Image: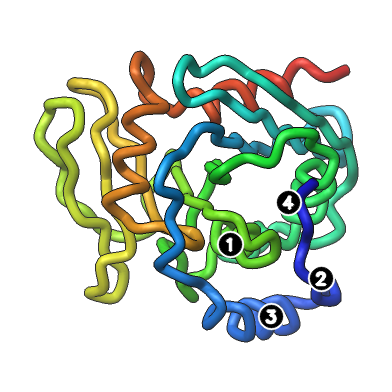
Amino acid sequence: MIRVREPHPWPSTEAEAIAIQEKLRPLVRFDGEPAEVRTAAGLDVAYRDDSDELVAAVTVLNVADLSVVDSVVVCGKPEFPYIPGLFAFREAPSLLEALKKLSVVPDVLVCDGQGLAHPRRFGLACHLGVLTDLPSIGVGKTAMGRYEPPDEQRGEWSPLRMDDEVVGRALRTQRGVKPVFVSVGHRYTLDGACDLVLRLAPKYRLPETTRTADHLGRTQD
């Protein structure tokens, strides 16, 4: 069972949310990466078109064959407004509830979002990693920061920068396909995160962790 660090009070204002990020940011670690990753969890949140509900989906994959070995879906309503840089406060409560219901504790969390590639260096992957103390990485579909397009071959990458600081990488998971944007969340290295994403993305742009979680969330009635 996943144990969650004593949760902070969930904020009601932008200032409160930023203060929480600033308080938790020093707890991010860059060591403790698993020697072997056997299972990886994909985390994704979908928003229903016809209501104000969200669906938080978590799938756990066997990294060896990318089969789904566990999954949980939690439906809820976001209790925090849509504010760039503060997505975790909309999505983390439902994702944490889903994580606590898993029967398989994953070796790593692969978040559909950012880690250090964030204005305050504390995106969703950092937030969930710190609260669960599980290794975590962020794999974003869009860049938070500046980058030069990497070479076209699979596995090529280029630095992702914010404020002249390297916060992640633009990683080409498939030849000639738009890169994904990888950043550390907690207890991981950037080299290790990129290696894992390539293992999880043998055929498509997005890792299978994200693809399976996205599919699960969108097929819920």
Residue at (36, 47) in percent of width and height: 193
In the displayed structure, does residue 162 sit left or right of residue 67?
A: left
Mark 1 to mark 4: distance in Å?
13 Å
- The quarter of the picture where residue 213 lies is top right
Question: Where residue 155 sits: x, y (%)?
Answer: 19, 33
Question: Quick check: marks 3 and 1 in contact, CB under 8 Å?
Answer: no
Mark 3 to mark 1: distance in Å?
15 Å
Q: Earlier in the sequence, mark 1 or mark 4?
A: 1
Mark 4 to mark 2: distance in Å?
14 Å
**Label 4: element kind:** helix
* Residue carrying label 3: 20
Q: Nearer the viewer, residue 120 or 109?
A: 109
Mark 2 to mark 1: distance in Å?
22 Å
| Foreground label between 2 and 1 | 2
Q: Is residue 158 above or below residue 10?
A: above
Marking on residue 209:
none
| Foreground label between 2 and 3 | 2
Q: Is residue 37 above or below residue 19?
A: above
| Foreground label between 4 and 2 | 2
* Residue carrying label 1: 84
* Residue carrying label 2: 7
Q: Earlier in the sequence, mark 4 or mark 2?
A: 2
Q: Is residue 155 above or below residue 219?
A: below
Q: Nearer the viewer, residue 151 or 184?
A: 184
* Residue carrying label 4: 91
Q: Given the image, on which type of amino acid does mark 4 rest?
A: Glu
Q: Earlier in the sequence, mark 3 or mark 1?
A: 3
Q: Earlier in the sequence, mark 3 or mark 4?
A: 3
